[in-house]
Image (tube, grey):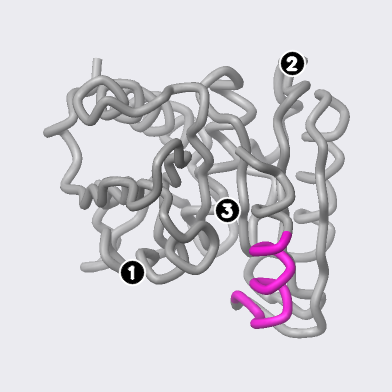
């Protein structure tokens, strides 16, 4: 089982009483500091838990291995997602976080990992705000887990060459089929967190009242 020291990470305590925790998962080549500004923008006052992915791909941090661009090592994804879930559980104990109020947010590789957490560990998270995420279990139908009560925001680029729109829409469908309340926002750009989508994600987070 993962311990809190198994991942290099940053923890920022909540600045507001009764605030949720935002689990931040960076994209390829970034680290545990990269999405702290996103966390503050999405949920001012929330506790921030931001680990670093353990996979080294030519000097770039990642959450799981890939066989080539756009093709995931699904077995590695499953194994490392389980390890990450253990870390989150242990971090909730260590930092005295409410385990029922943890929301994941991620970009690209981190967003795919966040989607895998939802589908493989459905009781871990209350919600998710994922940017440039696609269906993570490529070629596999996820188990029929219960995601009722989970709220998800997906921000996707219509011209994204890395996470194609059909993969983003497939993820939305997989989550909805398992009971999640999904808000999918598409923007005309590519592999990025578009400012308009971030504004909508912030409003969504406020409305969700995690």
Assign the N terminus to one quadrant of the image: top left
Where in the figure is residue 37, as x and y percent of width and height?
39, 71
Labelled pair 3, 2 in contact (Cβ < 8 Å): no
Q: Relative to the observer, which residue lies in front, 192 or 80?
A: 192
Res 31 seen here: yes
Residue 108 showing in the rendered view: no
Compared with 208, 81 (above or below) is above
Q: Which residue is denoted by mark 3 in the rendering? A: 71
Label 3: element kind = strand
Relative to residue 98, is residue 41 depicted above or below?
below
Magenta: main secondary structure equals helix
CA–CA distance in space, label 3 to label 2: 27 Å
Q: Counting other residues with Cα less than 10 Å from the Cα at mark 1, is it few (<14), some (14-19), or many (20 or more)?
A: some
Residue appearing at x 53%, y 32% in the figure: 117
Q: Is residue 160 above or below residue 2?
A: below
Residue 30 as seen in the image, left or right of residue 185: left
Mark carried by residue 137 = none
Residue visible at 60% across and 30% down? 126
Q: Compare marks 2 and 1 and give the one earlier in the sequence.
A: 1
Q: Nearer the viewer, residue 87 or 59?
A: 87
Residues under labels 1 and 3: Cα distance? 24 Å
Q: Which residues are magenta?
A: 193-203
Q: How many discs appear?
A: 3
Q: Which mark is residue 34?
A: 1
**Helix, strand or loop status at disc 1:** loop
Q: Which residue is mark 2?
A: 146
As measured in the structure, the alpha-carbon distance from the residue carrying label 2 to the one carrying label 1 is 31 Å
Asked whether the beta carbons under mark 2 and mark 1 sit within 8 Å of each other, the answer is: no
The residue at the point 27 percent across, 65 percent down is 33
Tag 2 secondary structure: loop
């Amino acid at each position: 089982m993962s311990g809190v020291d198994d991942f290099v990470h940053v923890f920022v305590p909540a600045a507001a009483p009764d605030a949720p925790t935002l689990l931040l998962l960076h994209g390829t080549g970034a680290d545990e500091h990269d999405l702290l500004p996103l966390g503050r923008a999405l949920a001012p006052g929330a506790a921030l838990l931001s680990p670093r992915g353990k996979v080294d791909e030519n000097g770039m941090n990642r959450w799981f291995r890939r066989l080539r661009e756009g093709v995931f090592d699904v077995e590695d994804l499953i194994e490392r997602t389980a390890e990450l879930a253990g870390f989150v559980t242990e971090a909730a104990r260590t930092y005295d976080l409410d385990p029922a109020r943890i929301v994941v947010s991620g970009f690209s590789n981190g967003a795919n990992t966040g989607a895998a957490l939802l589908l493989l560990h459905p009781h871990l998270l209350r919600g998710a705000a994922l940017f440039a995420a696609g269906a993570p279990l490529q070629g596999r139908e996820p188990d029929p887990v219960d995601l009722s009560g989970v709220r998800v925001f997906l921000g996707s680029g219509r011209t994204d060459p890395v996470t194609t729109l059909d993969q983003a829409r497939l993820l939305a469908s997989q989550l909805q089929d398992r009971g999640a309340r999904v808000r999918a926002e598409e923007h005309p750009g590519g592999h990025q967190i578009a400012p308009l989508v971030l504004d909508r994600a912030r409003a969504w987070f406020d409305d969700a009242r995690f």
